[in-house]
Structures are given as C-alpha cells and as structure tokens.
Amino acid sequence: LKLLGGCLDPHGCFLLERGIKTLAVRMRAHAEAAQAVAEALEAHPKVTEVLYPGLPSHPDHALAQQLLRNPGGMVSFTVQGGDEAALRLCRAVRVAKEATSLGGVETLISLPFNTSHVAMSAEDRLAAGIGPGMVRLSVGIEDPADLIADLGAALG
C-alpha cells in the first residue's frame, strides 16, 4: 500500500472491468440527454441562466467544441427566486434524485449552497460564480423527454 497505493479487491476489479465495457455508450447517452435538457432549460421562463458547454450561449462553447468529444453530462442552471425556489425544485422532481454524487446512470440534482459549497459565505459563492438559485444536475441515461417533463413540472 505504501509503495503502490490502494488496490482493488477482486469484486471491485470485476465491477470495473464490467463497467468499462459500456463506458463509451453511457457517456454518449449522458451527453445527448444533457444537451436536450440544457436546451429545454434555456428556453424555460423560470430559468435565468444555463451553463453547459454544449450550448452556443456558454462562454467557452467554441473551446469546448475544439477540445471535447462530447460536453459531458453536467448541467448547471439558475432558477428565478433564489435558493428557496431551487430548494422547492429539488423537492418537487420525481425522476431526478436529490443527491451529491456524480457519474452514475441516474440523474442527480443538488444545490451548491447547501452541499459542495456550504462552507463558503454567500459573498464568496457569488465571487466564484455560484449565485442564489444555482442548481447542479448530473444528467443520467434516462429518456431526456422524461427528465425535461420532470423538471418542467417541478419548475411550474
């Protein structure tokens, strides 16, 4: 352990080997679903900003097109009404699960103000580009239409 770092147990190796076979397919599904969700959110009247490198409105869209095969499955967006509205959204979604993990096949939703950036002051979060009402969505491989309908109903 001191020389080589951690090592996986046999079952962990089996799971890694099994999962790696479908990684490209899953990543393509993540990105396709995230693109559709980001486009729908950008058109929603209660969403003030969507950050996703697959959108032409993203400040680094051109760079992302040069560097990335696909823009991934992480979408950040800001809802009108600040953190209270974002909390209501998280509690109202049914397809997405409120959790703070990444990389699974299910869609997860979280709020930076009460998870990853809870130790920062509101001023420090704002300086870092995390304003009131920001939501992080790790898009899974569910049908994008189901995710879009779920988010639309929760925003309504």
Image (cartoon, rainbow, N blue to C red):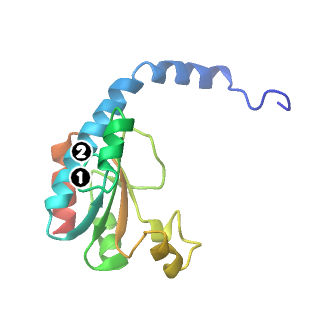
Residue hosting label 2: 35
Query: Tag 2, which secondary structure?
Result: helix
Residue hosting label 1: 38
Query: Considering depth in this image, is 91 or 60 the residue closer to the camera?
Result: 60
Q: Residue furthest right?
A: 2
- Quadrant of the snapshot with the N terminus: top right
Name the amino acid, label 2. Gln
Q: Which mark is residue 97?
A: none
Residue 134: image x %, image y %?
Answer: 36, 68
User: Can see residue 147?
Assistant: no
Q: Residue at x 57, y 74 (%)?
A: 120
- Disc 2/disc 1 C-alpha distance (Å): 5 Å
Mark 2 and mark 1 residues within 8 Å of each other at the beta carbon: yes
Q: Residues within 10 Å of mark 1 (few under 14, many from 20)?
A: many
- Quadrant of the snapshot with the C terminus: bottom left
Query: Tag 1, which secondary structure?
Result: helix
Q: Residue at x 24, y 37 (%)?
A: 32
As drawn, 46 above or below 37:
below
As drawn, 95 above or below 113:
above
Is 125 displayed left or right of 26 in the figure?
Answer: right
Residue 83: image x %, image y %?
Answer: 37, 76
Q: Residue at x 29, y 55 (%)?
A: 58
User: Can see residue 36?
Assistant: yes
Occupied quadrant, residue 10: top right
